[in-house]
Image (spheres, rainbow, N blue to C red):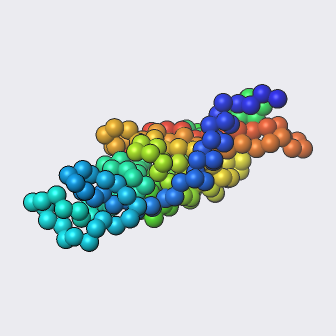
Amino acid sequence: MRISPRLLVGLAALAVTGLTHAGTTVFKCIKGGQTILTDRPCASTPFDSSSSTAAPSDSTLSGSAPSFSPVGKWSGQVQYQANENGQLLQAAHSVVSLAAEFTPDGKLAGSSDENGCKLLGIWSQDAQHIVWVDVTLSTCRFPGLNRRFNGSFLLAKPAGSAQLQIIATDLPHEGQGARMYDIKGTLRR
């Protein structure tokens, strides 16, 4: 049995998603003239902008710089696709607008009105540019798309755009072959 590279990427995303925590507060402290990132609040010394005393600064999600946070509203064209045993399913294929919002508490919601899809899920940031997403689609006109998807939301530099890539698979069962579903596109703030 040959395993698709896309399936391997999806499985890796699942594994990493389980290891990260959305909304982890990170404190940026100044200690001995060096900036240190920590998961604990800085020393209780009051902040004095004219000196380098330890003091909490803006906290960010999962260690990312504020400019590389996915938090906010995003929109753009995405392609919805499905294939069965390697053959494209035309009924599932569409290129439509997606509007999505990432909230500071690690939630993700959005919709593609043209194909009826609504998405709801969670996100976690693993590295400065990598955001893992786990979403469930519902109300899609093509019923096979109504399922759970996993993948990534890669923030570009500067973070005004990002690449969404999420996939789902369906094992063969009576009357249907193995299916792979994927949604890809570029979103902008």
Query: Looking at the image, which residue is at 38% across and 65% down?
Result: 40
Between 1 and 36, the residue placed more toward the observer is: 36
Image x and y of residue 181, in percent: 67, 40
Image x and y of residue 160, in percent: 33, 43
User: Residue lying furthest front in this view?
Assistant: 32
Q: Point out the image quarter for the N terminus.
A: top right
- Res. 55 image quadrant: bottom left
How many numbered marks appear?
0
Image x and y of residue 159, in percent: 34, 43
Question: Relative to residue 59, is residue 86 depicted above or below?
Answer: above
User: Residue lying furthest right in this view?
Assistant: 174
Between 95 and 30, the residue placed more toward the observer is: 30
Q: Is residue 102 visible?
A: yes
Query: Looking at the image, which residue is at 63% across and 47% down?
Result: 15
Image x and y of residue 61, in percent: 40, 57
Query: Looking at the image, which residue is at 82% across and 37% down?
Result: 177
Question: Relative to residue 148, is residue 168 depicted above or below?
Answer: above
Query: Looking at the image, which residue is at 18% across and 62% down?
Result: 53
User: Residue lying furthest left in this view?
Assistant: 50
Between 91 and 181, the residue placed more toward the observer is: 181
**In the drawing, does residue 164 fall left or right of residue 81?**
left
**In the drawing, does residue 55 fall left or right of residue 139?**
left
**In the drawing, does residue 137 fall left or right of residue 65?**
right
Q: Is residue 108 visible?
A: no
